[in-house]
Image (cartoon, rainbow, N blue to C red):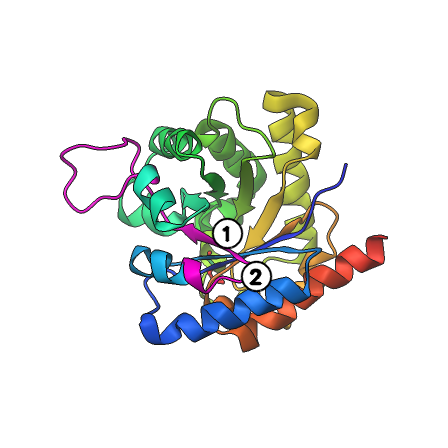
Amino acid sequence: MSRRKLVVGNWKMNGMREHLDEVEAIGDLAAAHPAVEVGLCLPATLIMAGSQKRGAAFIGAQNCHMDMSGAYTGSLSAEMLAEAGATWVITGHSERREARGETNADIAAKALAAKAAGLKVILCVGESLDVRDAGDAEAVVSAQLLASLPEGAAADWLAVAYEPIWAIGTGRIPTMEAVETMHAALRAALATRIGAEADEMRILYGGSMNGANAAELLAIADVDGGLIGGASLTAEKFAPIIEAADARVTAAV
Ligand code: PGA
């Protein structure tokens, strides 16, 4: 088992051309830490320009349509995103599950479309605060993962991101014990579907990860990286997270 640490920024609906300097600086950080796989999921409007400035980082998209073409006003296909320069795409982010009503089946279909276009996928799952408080989080999120996992999911094209909804953008994170328990539960759930391949699949933590808490989160056995919103918008904020991931690699050698 060797799971390369994966640290991915999710810029959400942030970023104009003037922020391409940050993309470039983050690309330089990626080059300085080759042991870590670093990427930025940009708004679609910046994917093409960002791809020119990405250095050693990869560029991803934040969503794709499940069909490759058609009468879907305002949507973008995986093929279009790949042509623009994306090599990864996020599917199933809670901001889309909740606000756009995306179902587990939609998310699995989007992941398959992404794979068909040659994109790698970060598949997001996570519980609401009500579910967490009810003590059902592991069971609910494991079921969500299995229901949104596409056919043929494999570690060379798909990573999972566990993002407790109540931790996103709030500055709150679960206890380290809760993260450890959840990640172990998700890996066990994956094993029921994909067997030994589950040991190779990266499971990222997301939700208010930042320079101050990354080292502790990334030290947890089944945490293979992070999906980072706010703290990925500048190279200055993102750098300590990438450095913390690299330090784990060094510690493991
Ligand atoms: P956050 O966002 O790091 O700003 O909490 C994470 C995400 O939504 O992917």
Residue extent of the magenta highlight: 51-78
The residue carrying mark 2 has its beta carbon less than 8 Å from ligand 1: no
Q: Which is nearer the eye, 199 or 27?
A: 27
Amino acid, disc 2:
Ile
Q: Residue at x 39, y 58 (%)?
A: 42
Q: How many numbered tags mark residues here?
A: 2
Q: Which residue is mark 1?
A: 164
Q: Which residue is mark 2?
A: 173
Q: Which is nearer the eye, 21 or 95?
A: 21
Magenta segment includes 168: no
Q: Residue at x 54, y 47 (%)?
A: 162
Q: Tell me the distance, in whole angstroms, between the alpha carbons under discs 1 and 2.
A: 8 Å
Q: Do callouts 1 and 2 mark residues in contact (Cβ within 8 Å)?
A: yes
User: Looking at the magenta stretch, what is its main secondary structure?
Assistant: loop
Q: Residues within 10 Å of mark 1 (few under 14, many from 20)?
A: many
Q: Residue at x 46, y 68 (%)?
A: 23
User: Residue placed farthest to the front in the image?
Assistant: 52
Amino acid, disc 1:
Pro
Q: Residue at x 18, y 47 (%)?
A: 74
The image quadrant that residue 36 belongs to is bottom right
- Considering only vertical position in the picture, is 195 above or below 46? above
Position of 222 with respect to 115 (left or right) is: right
Magenta segment includes 72: yes
